[in-house]
Image (tube, rainbow, N blue to C red):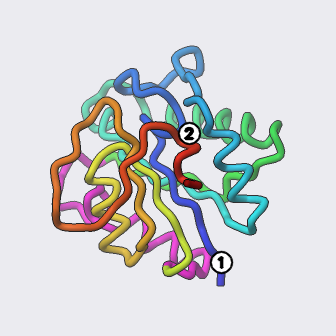
């Protein structure tokens, strides 16, 4: 079985400038390469699970998302880091099984990559990220404080202000 570091995209991998869909607007978060490299060196796969409702809203096309995801993956690769897969959901329907806070993307990844959830981690910047991971059985949850305010007592998680705090 594989252990995985699950990451949200906007607000964790890149600065959330609201509906980032062009490479020129993609700005990596401080510490993201160090975090992913450290986990990879410890034998973790790196998987991204991201809601991309801007497609449904007509702000950009799915092809834009695919292009930026491929570019992002290549940028990680240049640093010796492999992103195993980017899962995304374009629906804005909060009842859609794959849209966070629902666990569908995580459940797909768990099946696709034979994931040992008990040894896996999730870093997100919204409570919906953590709720989705929690519903999929992932116990190690990290909330990156910043743009969004935490608002749940339903689950246990760690609050961090910087990505390197995952190791403290």
| Mark nearer the viewer, 1 or 2 | 1
Q: Position of residue 113 (x, y in %)?
A: 61, 75
Q: Who is closer to the viewer here, 41 or 90?
A: 41
Dominant secondary structure of the residues highlighted in magenta in the image? loop
Q: Position of residue 18 (x, y in %)?
A: 34, 24
User: In which quadrant will I find the N terminus?
Assistant: bottom right
Taking the spot 55% from the left edge, 30% from the top edge, the residue there is: 29
Q: Earlier in the sequence, mark 1 or mark 2?
A: 1
Q: Which residue is mark 2?
A: 66
* Residue 101 counted in the magenta span: yes
Q: Who is closer to the viewer here, 101 or 104?
A: 101
Taking the spot 55% from the left edge, 23% from the top edge, the residue there is: 26
Q: Which disc, if any, is residue 77? A: none
Q: Position of residue 154 (x, y in %)?
A: 17, 67
Q: Who is closer to the viewer here, 87 or 167?
A: 167
User: In which quadrant will I find the C terminus?
Assistant: bottom right
* Dot 1 crowding, Cα within 10 Å, few <14, some 14–19, many 20+: some
In the displayed structure, 94 sits above or below 113; it is above
Task: Give how far apart the Cα atoms at labels 1 and 2 are.
Answer: 25 Å
Judged left or right of residue 36, residue 127 is: left
Q: Position of residue 99 (x, y in %)?
A: 29, 56
| Res 30 → quadrant | top right
Q: Which residues are magenta?
A: 91-117
* Dot 2 crowding, Cα within 10 Å, few <14, some 14–19, many 20+: some
* Residue 95 counted in the magenta span: yes
In the displayed structure, 117 sits above or below 152; it is below
Taking the spot 30% from the left edge, 40% from the top edge, the residue there is: 53
SS label for mark 1: loop
SS label for mark 2: helix
Q: Which disc, if any, is residue 2? A: 1
Farthest front residue?
168
């Amino acid at each position: 079985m594989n252990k995985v570091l699950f990451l949200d995209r906007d607000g964790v991998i890149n600065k959330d400038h609201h509906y980032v869909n062009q490479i020129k607007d993609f700005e990596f978060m401080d510490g993201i390469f160090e975090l992913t490299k450290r986990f990879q060196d410890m034998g973790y796969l790196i998987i991204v699970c991201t809601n991309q409702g801007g497609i449904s809203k007509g702000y950009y096309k799915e092809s834009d998302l695919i292009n930026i995801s491929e570019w992002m993956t290549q940028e990680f690769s240049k640093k010796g880091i492999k992103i195993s897969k980017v899962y995304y959901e374009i629906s804005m329907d909060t009842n859609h099984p794959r849209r966070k806070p629902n666990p569908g993307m995580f459940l797909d990844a768990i099946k696709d990559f034979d994931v040992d959830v008990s040894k896996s981690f999730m870093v997100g910047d919204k409570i919906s990220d953590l709720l989705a991971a929690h519903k999929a059985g992932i116990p190690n949850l990290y909330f990156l404080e910043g743009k969004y305010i935490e608002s749940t007592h339903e689950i246990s998680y760690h609050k961090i202000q910087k990505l390197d705090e995952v190791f403290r």
